[in-house]
Image (cartoon, rainbow, N blue to C red):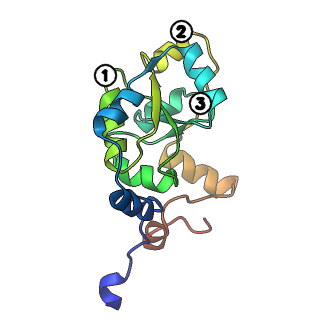
């Protein structure tokens, strides 16, 4: 048992909530889609975001997200381990969600969220991030650096390093002092 369980991480926080959903029942995919497939203009998107506790979930690739994103949004790329990361980063399956996706991928995102119990998508930014930019709404960016630049800064400036990966990933390999 010890050998088999070594290195396994606890299940994501949403697992017990999914068990209850399976026992009590859940809404049909048609109902979930009807609620979530609401294209929103930049003004309407901002209004819904400000009037609800909705989380803004940007499903674009991380490098593209870093170039410009809506303030306070989080990024979980649809093309990666989407369900796993949603479960890790969004602890409550009842969380209301507003989507920012690549145009044409809105329905896919709603379905994939629903597959793991996240059925409260309120809508999506019609036209994706370009709609936000065209409306001249505020954008934030993240500076990404290469491994070589990181190494230079690490060895000269000695900045604090925060490793935000799972414990098992950290235990497997990490930067000394992180």
The correct choice, above or below, for 175 with respect to 81 in the image is below
Task: Give the number of the mark in front: 2 or 3.
Answer: 2
Q: Is residue 85 left or right of residue 66?
A: left
Percent coordinates x, y for residue 34 in the rendering: 36, 27
Dot 3 or dot 1: first in sequence order is 1
Please tell me which residue lies in front, 47 or 169: 47
Q: In which quarter of the image is residue 4?
A: bottom left
What residue is at 44 percent from the left and 60 percent from the top?
Answer: 17
Rounded to the nearest angstrom, the CA distance separating label 2 from label 1 is: 18 Å
Q: Do the residues labelled 3 and 1 touch (CB within 8 Å)?
A: no
| Residue at image mark 1 | 104
Secondary structure of residue under mark 3: loop
Please tell me which residue lies in front, 165 or 145: 165
The correct choice, above or below, for 32 with respect to 149 in the image is above
Whether residue 173 appears in this view of the structure is yes
What residue is at 43 percent from the left and 49 percent from the top?
Answer: 86
Percent coordinates x, y for residue 175 in the rendering: 54, 64
Dot 2 or dot 1: first in sequence order is 1
| Residue at image mark 2 | 134
Percent coordinates x, y for residue 173 in the rendering: 45, 69
Q: Quadrant of residue 69?
A: top right
| Residue at image mark 3 | 141
What residue is at 42 percent from the left and 72 percent from the top?
Answer: 9
Q: Is residue 11 left or right of residue 163?
A: left
The correct choice, above or below, for 158 with respect to 133 in the image is below
Please tell me which residue lies in front, 93 or 135: 93
Percent coordinates x, y for residue 143 in the rendering: 58, 36
């Amino acid at each position: 048992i010890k050998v088999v369980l070594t290195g396994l991480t606890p299940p994501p926080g949403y697992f017990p909530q999914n068990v209850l959903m399976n026992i009590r029942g859940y809404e049909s995919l048609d109902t979930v889609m009807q609620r979530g497939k609401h294209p929103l203009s930049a003004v309407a998107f901002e209004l819904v975001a400000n009037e609800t506790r909705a989380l803004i979930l940007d499903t674009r690739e991380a490098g593209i997200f870093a170039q410009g994103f809506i303030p306070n949004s989080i990024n979980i790329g649809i093309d990666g381990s989407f369900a796993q990361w949603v479960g890790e980063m969004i602890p409550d399956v009842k969380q209301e969600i507003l989507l920012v996706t690549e145009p044409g991928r809105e329905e896919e995102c709603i379905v994939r969220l629903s597959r793991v119990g996240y059925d409260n998508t309120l809508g999506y930014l019609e036209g994706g991030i370009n709609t936000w930019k065209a409306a001249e709404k505020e954008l934030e960016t993240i500076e990404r650096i290469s491994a070589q630049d990181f190494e230079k800064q690490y060895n000269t400036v000695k900045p604090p390093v925060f490793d935000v990966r799972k414990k098992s990933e950290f235990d497997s390999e990490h930067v000394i002092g992180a």
